[in-house]
Image (tube, rainbow, N blue to C red):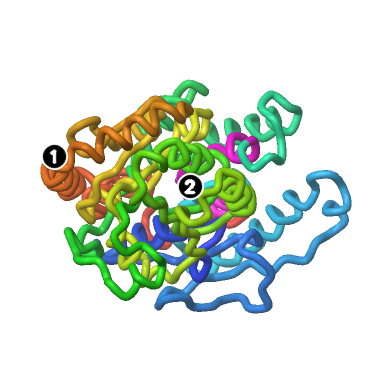
Amino acid sequence: MLILHVLDHSLPLHSGYAFRTVAILREQRSRGWQTIHVTTPRQGPTGVAQDEADGWTFERTPFTSGWLSRLPGGAYFDEMIATTRRLLGLIDRHRPDVVHAHSPVLNALPAIYAGRRRGVPVVYEVRALWEDGAVDHGTTTEGSLRYRISRALETFALRHANHVTTICEGLRREITSRGIPGERVTVIPNAVDTNAFRFGSTPDPELRARLGLQGATVLGFAGSFYGYEGLDHLIEALGTLAPRHPDLKLLLLGGGPQQANLETLTQELNLTDRVVFTGRVPQREVQQYYDLVDLLVYPRKPIRLTELVTPLKPLEAMAQGRVLIASDVGGHRELIRDGQTGYLFPAGDVAALASTIERVLGQRQEWDRIREQGRRFVESERTWARSVANYEPVYSRLAAPAGVVARA
């Protein structure tokens, strides 16, 4: 079976999106399937039609803006036109059995058009809804004209794809609420490669010293610094706890749009000696930073995006045997069993976050049990082998007879 994957972006860019993609591709290859991977112009400017990253070959889509780009929102249409042309050429050359378009809808619409023109079935994988992501990034507001147009385009793509996959139950419910029959929607949950994470590894004393964390109890977060992650709440909670816990520090691993605001907040609360910003680090070194953390904290705020979408980072934390605290947004409740594989607190409540951190710090005798149960959860329910197996019935049902490609 040959699958043509259509992607927003890929390696060498680092993001949860790119890492999920590679995990899926690796597991599909291990099942004996062939895969081709094309990124849209959203990968960024490129002068090549193909390149390699970490051993993977990615087809690229060169982009030249046309007259539509001079209109408000017109650049999106120029991008989709470029993507459509690229897909038609790749389908003619490789004759895939399935075209698999991953979020956003800017990928799905060209894939659906090209698939219809060439008689190839299309799977649309929803990792997040475009309109909700735009709200969080501040490019629109809920209920605005742009929001309603984006939502209408999403619904159109969901209805016209041959099958829809998504990453969690929250998104599945949202998709079926738009009139998509449940039998046309399959959940392919986020997962981890447990072999890639060391369980209970020992911290590097040199790195601990370099970061100024000797003798400290370390709270930690690893990921992108978006507003919905609630890192401002985490810093505020640290400010509440600091007078009673002189050894408590916070390690923030990563970067993103909110970094400057978070650094300013740290200064305003006189916590510059308590908060360590590492910046982005190479993926191969992330484990060393995780090893320094006593409690990982994921304080996502309660908005539509976080209620609907499950993140990847808590699963990675459980795979490493880390104790974690998270807000009780819907995306976290799908992953974390309170008091069994981690701890939950009321989302958006700084006082509750501080209280939960303090309570968990006082229950260290429970940590080994939490670590072991978290690891067992990912080993039994959230491995990529188990998750990717859910594609097989979808692809098998849709795939056209080998070599049959309709010509427009």
Residue span colored magenta:
109-135
Assess whether residue 65 is covered by the magenta stretch.
no
Element under label 1?
A: helix
Mark 1: amino acid:
Glu
Query: Which residue shows up at 40% across the image and 38% down it?
Result: 241
Mark 2: amino acid:
Val
Q: Nearer the viewer, residue 157 or 142?
A: 142
Q: Which residue is mark 2?
A: 122
Assess whether residue 124 is covered by the magenta stretch.
yes
Q: Which residue is mark 1?
A: 366
Which quadrant does the C terminus fall into?
bottom right
Foreground: disc 1 or disc 2: 1
Query: Which residue shows up at 87% across the image and 56% down it?
Result: 67
What x and y, as percent, mark residue 80?
68, 53
Describe residue 192's horizontal placement relative to residue 305 as left or right. left
Which quadrant does the N terminus fall into?
bottom left
Query: Which residue shows up at 36% across the image and 62% down it?
Result: 213
What x and y, as percent, mark residue 170?
40, 29
Can residue 266 be seen at all in this image of the molecule?
Answer: yes
Q: Residues within 10 Å of mark 2 (few under 14, many from 20)?
A: many
What x and y, as percent, mark residue 83?
64, 58
Q: Is residue 59 above or below residue 271?
A: below
